[in-house]
Image (cartoon, helix red, strand yellow):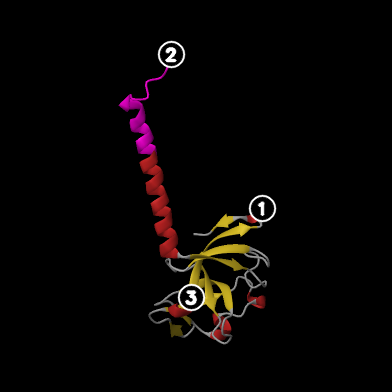
Amino acid sequence: MDQMDCSDPRGQRYHGLEKLVFAGSLMATLAWVLARRPFRVVVDGRSMAPTLEPGDLLIATKRGGVRRGSLVVVAHPGREGYEMVKRVAAVAGDRIGDRTLGPGEYWVVGDDPSASTDSRSLGPVGGEAIRGVVRARYWPLSRSTVFG
């Protein structure tokens, strides 16, 4: 019966490379998780319909670029501990009505204006009120989406 020569260094070289790539990928993923600190969000309300529906489960990250069109988790200025998901409609330097947003100010709105409490009634929000950037919807599976 023939036996394979396991001492052949040519065959082992590739296994070492696979392990190195796997370890590097694992470290990069861990670094991303630690830097971005993802958290779960449950949609409760119709202010973001039809984009988001009540019961949708989202992943948001504590860090990330906030730009026009981003979906963000924002602290309600009048209700301590209450957070809302809104869309960023304008950023610093943009003009809204007779006002120009200052540094660190954002204009956030719901996709359904008739069901949304947002900057139209609350005014602009400061960057410190933005708790995270929505990255994906993972439930329901039939509507799973990655948001840019």
Residue ranking furthest to the front: 1
Image quarter for residue 92?
bottom left
Q: Is residue 60 above or below residue 117?
A: above
Image quarter for residue 126?
bottom left
Q: Which mark is residue 142?
A: 1
Disc 3 vs disc 2: which is toward the camera?
Answer: 2
Mark 3: secondary structure: strand
Task: Left or right? Give the position of 94 relative to 59.
Answer: left
Residue ranking furthest to the left: 9
Q: Residue at x 59, y 59 (%)?
A: 137
Q: Is residue 16 magenta?
A: yes
**Marks 3/2: CA distance?**
66 Å
Residue at label 3?
A: 130
In contact (CB < 8 Å): disc 1 and disc 2: no
**Dot 1 amino acid type:** Ser
User: Looking at the image, is mark 1 or mark 2 earlier in the sequence?
Assistant: 2
**Dot 2 amino acid type:** Asp
Mark 2: secondary structure: loop
Q: Is residue 20 above or below residue 99?
A: above
Q: Residue at x 46, y 65 (%)?
A: 37
Disc 1 vs disc 2: which is toward the camera?
Answer: 2
From the top left corner, tell me how far across and down residue 1 is, in percent.
46, 12
Task: Left or right? Give the position of 11 relative to 69.
Answer: left
Q: Residue at x 42, y 50 (%)?
A: 26
From the top left corner, tell me how far across and down residue 63 is, in percent.
43, 67
Q: Which mark is residue 2?
A: 2
Graded by Cα atoms within 10 Å as few (under 14), some (14 to 19) or many (20 or more), the crowding at tag 3 reads many
- In the image, the segment drawn in magenta is 1-18
Q: Foreground residue, 76 or 99?
A: 76
Task: Left or right? Give the position of 10 relative to 73.
Answer: left
From the top left corner, tell me how far across and down residue 140 is, in percent.
66, 57
